[in-house]
Image (cartoon, rainbow, N blue to C red):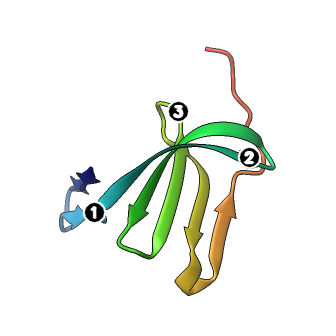
Amino acid sequence: RRHTRSFHVTGVQTCALPILTYLGTELLTVPAGTFPCEHYRSGDVVDYYVTGPDAIFVKFVWPANDMEYVLTKLEMSAP
């Protein structure tokens, strides 16, 4: 599946976010724990791993810029 989203802020041009390809669900372990993640890819260059209804970033990988983000700590408050 391919997804694209756009947004508009008053006084600012409408910006289109990258087209994402959904690659499936993966169980990912990072320093903050183990999470079921939705894996998306932008083009052939950036991977996004998000979890939960708020799409919390668990991992982000951009090899061309030698960048990797991993969730190191997650604190949840009571509802």
Question: Is 56 situated left or right of 53 in this image?
Answer: right
Secondary structure under badge 2?
strand
Q: Which residue is mark 2?
A: 29
Residue under the image location 43 percent in, 55 percent down = 40
Question: Is 62 situated left or right of 77 in this image?
Answer: left
Residue 27 shows which numbered tag?
none
Identity, as a three-letter code, of the amino acid under mark 3: Gly
Q: Which residue is mark 3?
A: 52
Q: Which residue is mark 1?
A: 19
Question: Is 22 situated left or right of 57 in this image?
Answer: left
Identity, as a three-letter code, of the amino acid under mark 1: Ile
Relative to residue 27, is residue 58 depicted above or below?
A: below
Secondary structure under badge 3?
loop
> How far apart in space, not on screen, are marks 2 and 3 (Cα)?
15 Å
Badge 1: few (under 14), some or many (20 or more) residues near its Cα, within 10 Å? some
Nearer the observer, 26 or 17: 26
> How far apart in space, not on screen, are marks 2 and 1 (Cα)?
26 Å
> How far apart in space, not on screen, are marks 1 and 3 (Cα)?
20 Å
Secondary structure under badge 1?
loop
